Image (cartoon, rainbow, N blue to C red):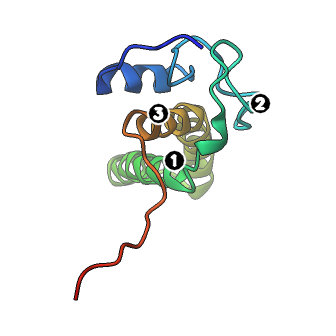
Amino acid sequence: MTDYPPTTVLQSAMRGLACKCPRCGQGKMYAGFLTLAPSCDRCGLDYAFIDTGDGPAIFIIMLAGAIVVACALIVEVKYQPPFWLHAVLWLPLILATTLLPLRSMKSLLIALQFHHKAAPGQLIDRPK
């Protein structure tokens, strides 16, 4: 196995946003839209350590919610369109702001998890 040089946080983040392997930066991270590959096809990094949980979805929901609600309020106050027009306007924006960045956000969190060597928390015995 090749020894890989340490990366900066920015390099790790860029690898994550590009959906590339957090170790080598070249292998694909996904086998499907959000389905992770079992390992990197270039360096063989086992992706079993990955546990992003609901983090990516929560970040996307918060960002998309702020964008869509701000736009909807501005349009409502300025133009007062009928409700059907709100549905026509905001449903595509909701889909675009949630589904498009979800894959990149998940791989960004995976890359940062790898960079910082994140592991499950463990209880320690403290002297009394």
Considering only vertical position in the picture, is 99 above or below 79?
A: above
Please name the residue shown 59% across and 44% down the image. 49
The residue that disc 1 covers is 56
- Residue lying farthest to the bottom in this orientation: 128
Assess disc 2: are there few (<14), some (14-19) or many (≥20) residues with their C-alpha within 10 Å of its C-alpha. few
Please name the residue shown 48% across and 47% down the image. 60
- Image quadrant containing the C terminus: bottom left
Image position, residue 99 (x, y; %): 61, 38
**Residue type for callout 1:** Pro
Assess disc 3: are there few (<14), some (14-19) or many (≥20) residues with their C-alpha within 10 Å of its C-alpha. many
Assess disc 1: are there few (<14), some (14-19) or many (≥20) residues with their C-alpha within 10 Å of its C-alpha. some
In terms of depth relative to the viewer, which is nearer, 35 or 118?
Answer: 118
Q: Are marks 1 and 3 in contact (CB under 8 Å)?
A: yes
Disc with the residue nearer the chain's start (2 vs 3): 2
The residue that disc 2 covers is 32
Gap between marks 2 and 3 measured at Cα: 16 Å
**Residue type for callout 3:** Leu
In terms of depth relative to the viewer, which is nearer, 60 or 1?
Answer: 1
Secondary structure type for disc 2: loop
